Amino acid sequence: MNEAFPPVTEKFPVLVTGGAGYIGSHAVLALLDQGWPVAVLDNLVTGFDWAVPEAATLVVGDIADADLVARTLAEHKIGAIMHFAGSVVVPESVENPLKYYDNNTVRSRALIAAAVAAGVPHFIFSSTAATYGIPEVVPVAEDMPKRPINPYGWSKLMTEQMLADATAAHPFNACILRYFNVAGADPQGRAGQSTAGATHLIKVAAEAATGKRGHVAIFGSDFDTPDGTGVRDYIHVSDLAAAHVAALEKLIAEPERNHVMNCGYGRGFSVLEVLDAVDRITNVTIERRLEPRRAGDPPSLVADNSRILATLPWRPQRAELDTIVADALAWERRLADR
């Protein structure tokens, strides 16, 4: 049932790894907004120190640094870990797979070991729909086969398995959240996607609409979809961050249980529909260039989100495509002003 949990009477400090990055920084905001003390551990390779609010404590370092992690967990009396740190660019994972198995798998193993040693009771892991590969059925549910088609997906799936095994052997529980296509920015303008060279469509389109790119490439126009372009389930980053806080409360309420849940809206938009939305909101026509399909791109990837809706008292607040696009555009303009 998705009834609200008993209120958490004592909000302990939460460690957010990768909390200076795109999704992690929004999770930090969501936690702070709900009154949770937050420490951020980030090596700032792709994150930004200015993305961490003053109300959170920033520890600059790597999750593979066992001494630093142990000291951070002890000094801040960490009661839960939200793990976002890692590498996320699928084509790069194909070109440099060992980087991804190091950053996403080996270092996650070190973080899990540190959590076990410190007795941290709750762990939330940032996973991905890439664990499904090219699904045979859409929308895709959590119990469908996991057949990653790139090292990025495998690196995340391996960490999922480590968490399942570790929670069976040690006294802590975990929630694995599999993201679909994350987009948008904090509606208050406090955070957004700031990474240079980002590959996500809505980010790329926002850059094109604000003059930072000359065009948007459309990779494939002959898919078996209504308009021939790929269809994806876009979830607003602030809704996703709220799901993490709800997941934390669920782990606290049911300390003997683990959870695996898709994070999406259960409906998809094509590349052309997204670009049309950007054109509509900006009243500017973005140049579109057709390119060949990228290897391994599924025609459609949409979440079956019935489990998260049944498990958590979480409901999307910013699910409209125009809202997601407008928030992304507003953030892109703020970045230009920086």
Image: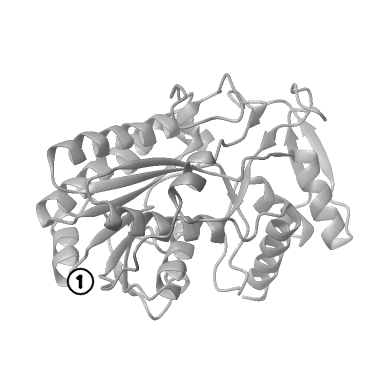
Please report the residue visible at 76 percent of the width from the left and 57 percent of the height from the top. Answer: 322
Q: Is residue 202 above or below residue 142?
A: below
Q: Can residue 195 be seen in this view?
A: no
Q: Quick one: 79 or 317, which is closer to the camera?
A: 317
* Secondary structure under the numbered disc 1 in the rendered image: loop
Relative side of 7 to 200, left or right: left
Residue 244: horizontal and vertical position, in percent?
Answer: 42, 56
Relative side of 212 to 241, left or right: right
Q: How crowded is mark 1: few (under 14 residues within 10 Å), some or many (20 or more)?
A: some
Please report the residue visible at 71 percent of the width from the left and 32 percent of the height from the top. Answer: 230
Among all residues in the image, which is located at the extreme bottom? 54
Q: In this view, does 110 lie above or below 289?
A: below
Q: Is residue 23 above or below residue 272?
A: below
**Quarter of the rendering containing residue 143:** top left
Relative side of 306 to 63, left or right: right
Residue 82: horizontal and vertical position, in percent?
Answer: 34, 56
Q: Is residue 323 above or below residue 53?
A: above
Q: Can residue 163 be seen in this view?
A: yes
Of the residues shown, which amino acid type is indicated by label 1?
A: His
What residue sits right under mark 1 in the picture?
Answer: 76
**Quarter of the rendering containing residue 330:** bottom right
Residue 181: horizontal and vertical position, in percent?
Answer: 58, 44
- The image shows a total of numbered marks equal to 1
In the rendered image, the quadrant that contains the C terminus is bottom right
